[in-house]
Amino acid sequence: MSIGIDDISFYTSNFYLDLKSLADVQNIEADKYYQGIGQERMGIVGADEDVVTMAAAAALPLFERSNKASIDTLLFATETGIDQSKAAGVFVHGLLGLPSRCRVVELKQACYSATAALQMACAIVAREPGRKVLVLASDIARYDLASSGEATQGCGAVAILVGANPKLVEIHPQSGRYTEDVMDFWRPNYRATALVDGKYSTKIYLKALKQAYLDYLEQGGTGFDQLDHLCYHLPFSRMAEKAQTQLARCSGSTRDPVARAAMIAPSLHYNRTIGNSYTASIYIGLTSLLDHATEDLSGKKIGFFSYGSGCVAEFFSGSVVAGYREYLHTQRHQTMLKARTELSYTQYLKFYNFECPADGGDHRMPEQTTGPYRLASIDQHKRIYCAR
Ligand code: HMG
């Protein structure tokens, strides 16, 4: 019996800022962003969107071919939590009408926790192969205005259905891990924006990649030159290029730079126009690979590197299942991205500066999202969601 990804779908907000608009205001060349960090646009959430509405929207298409009753567990990965106590996944459970005989929990470790959720989901299915686990990863990346991280903001959610004999990607049992207590990126509870030591964070990312990969090899994993594609955590798409160079170096790869670039190119399209979606980013990268690869990926091996600042990292792999193309949501993903509205820099500032009311009154949220779910109001500190 194999275990892995039976279905996958992502969602992002219908608003974005082109990084040229940011570069113009900063009086720098847009190519610093387009080429230097490899990003074109960043997704911006409306006032009536959050990690719950995005995650529910990502998950909705999965139930076109899967029965809600089979969902045994919902694991919600995020670092943009909306409550210190209640798991965001419980709101999603309600919006989607999932069975009451289902456990729901929220997981946190920066951008890494969706991978912990995926591995836990595989373990749950191994124990009870008839069950399915819904893994949701949803985040909004926010940095201070005029900080080095500002251009790497973004938002998105991904929904992954994990089950036995999956239709898309079998996850291999080998995995390599790396944890080190560092302060490269963090967000104290009293702050709405993250703090980051940008250059240091990229160095730690590459160190963790090497260490997790070496552990993966020791566990019997597949060497770099035997992998067909790589999906990396994507804070910005140039990071994947740096990671490829690092992995080629520490594996003694004989592949030339063009072949190495081709291993990652299809996985970068979506993230380039969404920005960092933290926990969701590596798996939005996977949907990008599945949706954009021109060759048939059946039987191809994919390496995954998941990184969460702080830091925890994991390297693992999977194989694409024959016939996977029949089950993709490519058209929906591409239509959603084409239908987005561009914000001017002034509009972006207005969205950025919107503050969720926190005084306990009854507040209706401005109607902005075009997604299937919205945050309708915050009343007596309670978040009220509805279908749109
Ligand atoms: P910066 O100071 O804005 O940019 O910081 P820079 O001056 O280093 O330039 C970036 C690149 O653009 C350079 O290339 C320049 O040469 C090039 P590189 O040296 O990297 O090869 N450049 C140009 N290229 C073409 N035309 C031009 C031009 N000008 C410059 N005109 C930094 C960049 C990544 C530090 C910043 O964006 C940042 O702080 N980002 C946030 C932190 C981050 O994303 N870290 C990534 C690793 S940590 C991680 O992935 C975890 C995270 O997702 C959080 C979590 O786990 O929860 C962040």
Image (cartoon, helix red, strand yellow):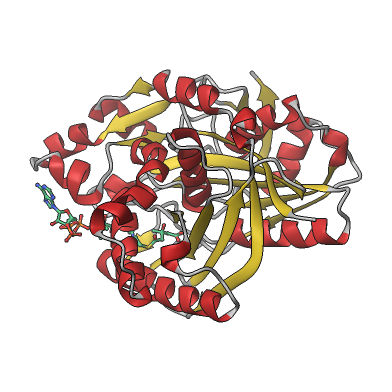
Give the residue displayed 64% in from the left and 31% down from the top. Answer: 327
In the image, 263 versus 142, the foreground residue is 263
Residue 297 in view (yes/no): yes
Q: Observer-nearest residue: 166 or 311?
A: 166
Say whether residue 267 is left or right of residue 107.
left
- In the figure, is residue 379 to the left or right of 140? right
Q: Is residue 85 visible?
A: no
Classify residue 152 as left or right of residue 68.
left
Q: Give the x, y percent position of residue 3.
A: 74, 54
Where in the figure is residue 249, as x and y percent of width and height? 30, 73
- Residue 250 at x, y percent in the picture: 35, 76
Residue 150 x %, y %: 29, 48
58 w.r.t. 368: above or below: below
The quarter in which the N terminus is drawn is: bottom right
Give the answer, above or below, for where 139 lies relative to 217: above
* Lateral position of residue 35 relative to residue 159, left or right: left
Taking the image in four quarters, ligand 1 sits in the one at bottom left
Please report the residue visible at 63 percent of the width from the left and 28 percent of the height from the top. 326
Q: Quadrant of the C terminus?
A: top right
Of all residues shown, which one is farthest toward the right? 101
